Amino acid sequence: MMISKACPRETYGKALLEAARTDERITALDADLSGSTMSCLLRQEFPERFFEMGIAEQNMVSVAAGMSLTGSIPFVHSFSMFITGRAFEQVRQSVALPKANVKLVGSSCGFSDFGDGATHQSLEDAAIMRAIPNMTVLIPMDPNDVRAAVAEALAIDGPVYIRLTRSEMEFIDVPADYSIREPFLLRDGSDVAIVANGSMTSLALAASQKLASEGIAASVINVSCLKPLAAEPLFSLIEGTAGIVTVEEHSVVGGLGSAILEALAARPKPLAMVGALDVFGQSAWSQDELLNHYGLTVDTICSRVRSLVEGRTIGHA
């Protein structure tokens, strides 16, 4: 069986260019990485609306905030680690605080920049952005969802952070009523709910299929909009299950699992997290090597689900 995949960065670049063709307010700023973030596609067709800012993320975000005051809709690009880390103060003070209409696009998230090691691997960026008031955080699950993230960012009059992986993503079939704004049921199951986002959603679906062969019915719920988290739709999807297993290519501190635990404070339910255990990454030959090393695997997800079904006390991966 052939699995259809595509590069989310290329999908993003094409989606941004298509949007720019119909909305002249859209501009792009990049920190000397346009060939990687794929903002270069907009640069090629609309050079007057592209701004190369060099390796100066703080200045880039400040300029974008100023541009937004003139009616421009700036899409600001860098690796996830640097746009959320190096430019944190500018994102907080100049973009989020005044609710500036600036879109922050963090590429090469998680372990996907495997060759550059811990300095470039962002395992805390979603937590940082989620903690900032007025910030919407989108983590697409597949290439089509990347396009939906661009459309959703444009529909929001205010700050948005889009988190993109460097690696190819599998296409996931969804019905016409799919919405990136709310938790969405991709596979039904009455025993346990597996909740995932980003490239981990494909992994969650594979785990659910494996568990089905063991007689365990595990639903799969995708949460591409990490903030604001639509809690009520999530509650309806997990009702009746024995518990939840969250799966994310991010630290277990402050990410998807944390967001759902916060939402469940008034409606407690057993929850286990699969993610990076409050650690930095490291260099490797491939992303899969890192995912295996840090326990972001189908086997780990299945183990957590089995533990919930059996009623054992469990924690993080």
Image (cartoon, rainbow, N blue to C red):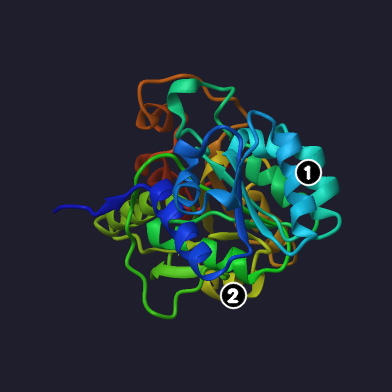
- Residue 116, percent across and down? 49, 21
Could you tell me the amino acid type at mark 1?
Ser
Residue 61, located in which quarter of the rendered image?
top right
- Residue 25, percent across and down? 63, 64
Residue labelled with disc 1: 62
Taking the spot 81% from the left edge, 46% from the top edge, the residue there is 92
User: Is there any visible trace of residue 192 in the rendered image?
Assistant: no
Q: Is residue 20 above or below residue 106?
A: below
- The answer to whether 152 appears left or right of 297 in the picture is right
Residue 211, located in which quarter of the rendered image?
bottom left
Could you tell me the amino acid type at mark 2?
Pro
Taking the spot 45% from the left edge, 53% from the top edge, the residue there is 45
Q: Helix, strand or loop at disc 2?
A: helix
Which of the pair 133/47 is nearer the observer? Answer: 47
> Which mark is on residue 233?
2
Which of the pair 82/182 is nearer the observer? Answer: 82
Label 1, residues with CA under 10 Å away: few <14, some 14-19, many ≥20: some
- The answer to whether 174 appears left or right of 78 in the picture is left
Which of the pair 141/301 is nearer the observer? Answer: 141
- Residue 137, percent across and down? 64, 56
> Which mark is on residue 95?
none
User: Is there any visible trace of residue 17 in the rendered image?
Assistant: yes
Label 2, residues with CA under 10 Å away: few <14, some 14-19, many ≥20: few
Taking the spot 54% from the left edge, 25% from the top edge, the residue there is 281
Lower position in the chain sequence, tag 1 or tag 2:
1
Q: Is residue 60 above or below residue 256?
A: above
| Distance of label 1 from label 2 (alpha carbons) | 36 Å
Q: Is residue 196 above or below residue 119?
A: below
- The answer to whether 168 appears left or right of 279 in the picture is left
Taking the spot 58% from the left edge, 34% from the top edge, the residue there is 122
Q: Is residue 54 above or below residue 146?
A: above
